[in-house]
Image (cartoon, coloured by chain):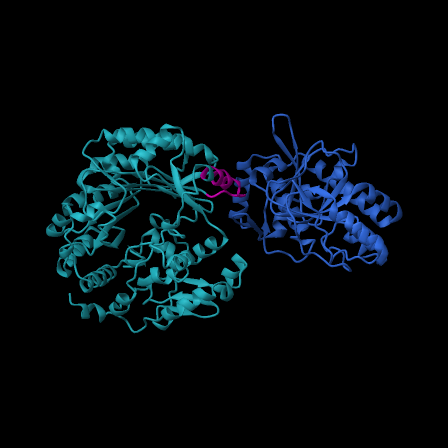
Amino acid sequence: MSARVAVSERLCSPRSEAQAALIAVARTSTVRGPGVGLVAEDGDEAQFCSTCAFGSVCLPYGVDKAALLELHCLVEHIGPYGPGDRIFRTGDRFDAIYAVRAGTVKTCLVDDEGREQVLGFHLPGEMVGLNAIHPARYPCDAIALDTVALCRFLFPALATLATRMPGVQQQLFRLLSHDIGKASVLAGDYSADERLAAFLIDLSARTTDHGATPPSLRLSMSRSDIANYLRLAAETVSRVLRRFQDQGLVDVDGRNVAIARPAELRNVARAMLRE
Amino acid sequence: MPLTQINARAVPDGNMPLMNNTPRPVFDSEIIARYDVAGPRYTSYPAAPNFTTHFGEAEFRAVARASNEDPIPRRLSIYVHVPFCFSPCFYCGCARIITRDRGKADGYLSRLHREIELVAPLFDRDRTVVQLHLGGGTPNFLDDRQMAELVETLGQNFSLTRSTEREFGIELDPRDAGPDYVRMLGKLGFNRVSVGIQDFDPEVQAAVNRIQSVEQTRAVLDAAREHGFRSTSVDLIYGLPKQTLSSFARTLEQVIALKPDRVAAYGYAHLPERFKAQRQIDAAELPDAATRLALLGLTIQMLTSAGYCYIGMDHFALPSDELSQAQGHGTLHRNFQGYSTHAACDLIGLGMSAIGRVGNSFSQNSKDLVGYYAALDAGRLPVVRGMTLDEDDVIRADVLQRLMCNGAIDIAAFETRHRIDFAVYFASDIARLRALVADGLVLLSPQRIAVTARGRLLLRVIAMCFDAHLARARDADVRYSKAL
């Protein structure tokens, strides 16, 4: 399905003929994605995007307006994708990395028999597709778990920009090492309690990073996905969560999980969080 | 008893809000008569007439699978419908088949077993069944062997809990169930029994074609207590032909002497154009509107004087019963079987005409044997209609649940839970509620909506203010029985 690239004029208002031309290119080009229109309200031109993975590049360092706009116009806002929609598939040629603006994206490996291995969940402000830089093909599927909006950074252009903007390059390296770090922790020898506690603490920390502390986490991932990611059985996920609930550590209501006693939950997870 | 005497019981603090301690409802015949309008019973919201044929097997399979994916999936509740009866009770509006041939049940059970085998794999095995309810029709139409096979098939395909929190109930017709049968049910794991009485008066019993002695009834209730059943319940119906205040007072005395833990007293709805059996009832023998109302007043007065708590709608329970306790703790729930202590389970409906509620959906099986058998013989699920609740339905269902079970809504907590501005979201509903506030049925403040003691008997009318489907269908031909 091909869709109009939704570039917000408000976010990227034409200031010069060159920029106007860029926007025109963005408008007429097509990307794979099911939706049109914007579902994320996350910033204006001056603030860039408050949820943007590269926001930290621009905001604290007072990048000059010209550079900001240059970065801005590299970005196509795409989506919304609905639950289950593929953003890219294993083997697709790598040409862009994505930043989540709204919703949650799951990345997973799918073997020949269709079995999934969940690699991660990507929340607003986080990148998807970093693991594809080498060998230039996406090594996994990226699937929207709910209504998802994304920023799409054309990679060659971003790489060029990185050579000129040290902040962008540093941020890329930071994101890459974080991605690698996450995978190795899960391979460790940890109990179900430790895994689940660390999962909730981590998710909560990542959610509160971007804006106010929510009263509860809304888990858009299914329990099979959580189980698969943590390398546990689905019923183990529920059994441990129920015990956490009985102990008063968490309060589970449907897909909403409130962490009632964060310090104690962090204590359960401490071995894993240390890594 | 004259109407005035019942009215005299209207206590002066009739406007006090409920504090979850089940105060006696105030019976105000003038107000009740004024609000005696047609409306749903709200064992579900949206009510069953809103179900459509756009919801079928594929939709049911999808919601069933999705229901496994919550971090802690809901536990399961199973309803099994046994549609057969040995003889027709003339008041009955249930989906049932009259036959004396017990062999007929074998054909039905083979399809029921097939349905169980098709439905069970849709639900993950760690989802324990904490509630099981056999209704009808007459579940004790099944003989010992058939009943044992049914429970065995359920146990092989679902994880039936063995813990003490289980609620495994069955509706019994004491005319066809002796103490031995009840003992057999106890051995199979049943721990709740609901016994149909309706009325003990011989003339009324003759008029509705249900002759049942007090002794038969007592034998079943005694056997249930002896064999470890935790809760006994009886059903009464007021508004039946030939009922008088004095005859029904005698029935109530006899019922109170039997000491059931719960009593359900339903108002008879005479809809002969819809329910064939009711055409056997002579409308001229039905009590008039004033007597009908007085019968309700009498029922409330005698049961509450005998120590029963009024739970809500048609239900009463002794203070020691779990329902009364749950209401006190604010943990009461309402479902198709009336009130329950179990937090939201996914309800699986099995058998002809059975209704299920899984995730945010309702589904109903074929209402006739032909359709039910044909689907299962072809290896399909017999789901023929239902609906998926939208966000608005879910929010309104929560309003109704709270009003019907706790008698109050904490507005701030409700707003947080559903992320809405209550006054804005329910502006037109609150406008409808104003007349009820003026009549002292409901207290309305920016913080709280609370049902008063006077409003407790009109929960259905209060609920109707929040029914968006009813508001839309007000002009359409959707018929319900009268509110009381």
* Quarter of the rendering occupied by the N terminus of chain B: bottom left
Looking at the image, residue B172 sits to the left or right of residue B434; the answer is left
The colour with which the image depicts chain A is: blue
State the residue lying farthest toward the top: A112
The colour with which the image depicts chain B is: cyan
Toward which corner of the image does residue B244 lie, by quadrant? bottom left
State the residue lying farthest toward the right: A164
Residue B17 appearing in the image: yes
Q: For this rendering, which residue is in front, B470 or A232?
A: B470
Q: For this rendering, which residue is in front, B329 or B458?
A: B458
Q: For this rendering, which residue is in front, B205 or A235?
A: B205
Residue B360 in the image, given as x and y percentages of width and height? 47, 47
Residue A157 in the image, given as x and y percentages of width and height? 83, 44
Residue B342 in the image, given as x and y percentages of width and height? 40, 48
Residue lying at 22% horizontally and 59% vertically, measured from the top left: B299
Looking at the image, residue B428 sits to the left or right of residue A220; the answer is left
Toward which corner of the image does residue B483 lie, by quadrant? bottom left
- Indicate whether residue B188 is drawn in magenta: no
